[in-house]
């Protein structure tokens, strides 16, 4: 008879545990994370502290410190429904709808500072993405990101926000302010490697390819085994093309293509465009055309690199004397990306 109360107690404890889990904050880890204190790819509990390098989760009497570079997302208990709606719209490519939802979530966050910060970052990050394809969004993106890094200088998102701010300013050729952003990013330990990549890109954009290559050789060697190494190699390939070292540039770009997952459209689209630029500069327009067509046919999901590929296809067809095909791609670019800077670039 004594077994019945024990079973009831066990069931009650299991139910209580399940309810507590359902009500907890959920820190979801990146795929393939090696963080050992997670269960089912996540850490559940109450988020009590956040910084650029780590998030602290309280689970009963235990504090679990999760490195931010292992975190894919954080869902806070009781967060406004608009937070999830913002993420859903962002994932579906509906940026303006997502921005509106993040603004609503920030307004509804009440006394939950982590929720408000996450919502404001969601809005700022989307504006940064839009600024890279729509020049009219640059001013808004810079203002929102600058306000964010001033408001949350020690928050979980400050590294990504400062990186986005530097990228937008580089894209807008505001090199002086981009240099300042990169220097500020480098002061944050969790942002030092990102600052190094952006610093090399700044040298390249300013026309100092030799200095950029020297920096990149050092950074690539130091980043062995890191996902950041892929971006460093592509920046180096661009610098090698600028220095007229076409064979080296082609070899490096093809290495990235071969090593990346075929479904990784972010890496593949940029790698093929970088390869196409190299081959075109090396007076191999037919080979360049094949590289750019890879982006159009296989990786059009990348809304930053796809318009670049369409413009470059148009330019190469024009060089080859295939004017009707060139006009076809020019029209596609105008129809699909009317606000892209690649659309406004003069026809080749």
Image (tube, grey):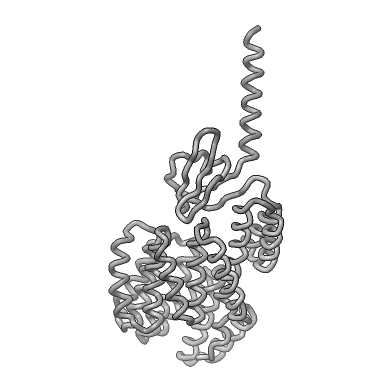
Above or below — where is 45 with respect to 87? above
The percent position of residue 35, horizontal first and vertical second, equals 44, 44
Compared with 282, 119 (above or below) is: above
> Which residue is found at the position 65% from the left and 40% from the top?
23
Q: Position of residue 88 (x, y in %)?
A: 65, 58
Residue found 54% across the figure and 61% down from its top: 152
Q: Is residue 308 among the parts visible in the rendering?
A: yes
Report the side of 103 relative to 134 (left or right).
Answer: right
Q: Quadrant of the N terminus?
A: top right
Q: In this rendered view, identify the residue nearer to me: 9 or 286.
A: 9
The spot of residue 49 in percent (x, y) is: 53, 48
The residue shown at (41%, 65%) is: 194
Name the residue nearer the viewer: 33 or 5: 5
The structure residue drawn at horizontal position 29% and vertical position 69%, both measured from the top left corner, is 217
Tell me if residue 206 comes above or below residue 15 in the rendering. below
Residue 29 at x, y percent in the picture: 50, 48
Q: How many marks?
A: 0
* Front one among 229 and 147: 147
- Quadrant position of residue 85: bottom right
318 lies left or right of 16: left
Q: Residue furthest top?
A: 1
Question: Relative to 155, does residue 162 appear above or below in the rendering?
Answer: below
């Amino acid at each position: 008879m004594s077994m019945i109360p024990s079973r009831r107690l066990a069931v009650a404890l299991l139910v209580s545990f399940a309810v507590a889990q359902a009500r907890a904050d959920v820190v979801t880890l990146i795929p393939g994370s090696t963080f050992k204190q997670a269960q089912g790819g996540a850490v559940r509990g109450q988020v009590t502290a956040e910084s650029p390098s780590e998030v602290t989760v309280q689970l009963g009497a235990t504090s679990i410190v999760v490195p931010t570079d292992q975190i894919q997302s954080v869902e806070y208990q009781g967060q406004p429904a608009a937070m999830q709606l913002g993420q859903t719209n962002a994932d579906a490519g509906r940026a303006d709808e997502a921005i509106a939802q993040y603004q609503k979530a920030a307004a509804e966050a009440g006394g939950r500072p982590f929720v408000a910060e996450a919502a404001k970052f969601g809005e700022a990050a989307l504006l940064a993405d839009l600024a890279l394809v729509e020049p009219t969004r640059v001013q808004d993106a810079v203002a929102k990101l600058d306000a964010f890094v001033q408001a949350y200088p020690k928050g979980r998102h400050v590294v990504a926000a400062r990186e986005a701010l530097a990228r937008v300013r580089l894209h807008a050729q505001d090199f002086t302010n981009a240099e300042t952003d990169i220097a500020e990013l480098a002061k944050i330990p969790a942002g030092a490697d990102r600052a190094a990549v952006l610093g090399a890109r700044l040298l390249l954009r300013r026309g100092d390819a030799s200095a950029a290559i020297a920096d990149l050789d050092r950074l690539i060697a130091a980043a062995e085994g890191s996902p950041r190494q892929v971006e460093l190699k592509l920046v180096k390939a661009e610098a090698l093309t600028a220095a007229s070292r076409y064979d080296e540039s082609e070899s490096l770009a093809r290495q990235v293509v071969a090593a990346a997952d075929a479904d990784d459209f972010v890496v593949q689209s940029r790698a093929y465009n970088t390869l196409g630029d190299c081959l075109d500069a090396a007076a191999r327009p037919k080979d360049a055309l094949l590289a750019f067509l890879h982006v159009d046919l296989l990786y059009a999901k990348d809304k930053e690199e796809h318009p670049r590929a369409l413009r470059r296809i148009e330019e190469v067809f024009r060089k080859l004397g295939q004017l009707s095909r060139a006009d076809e791609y020019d029209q596609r670019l105008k129809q699909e990306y009317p606000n892209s800077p690649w659309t406004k670039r003069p026809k080749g």
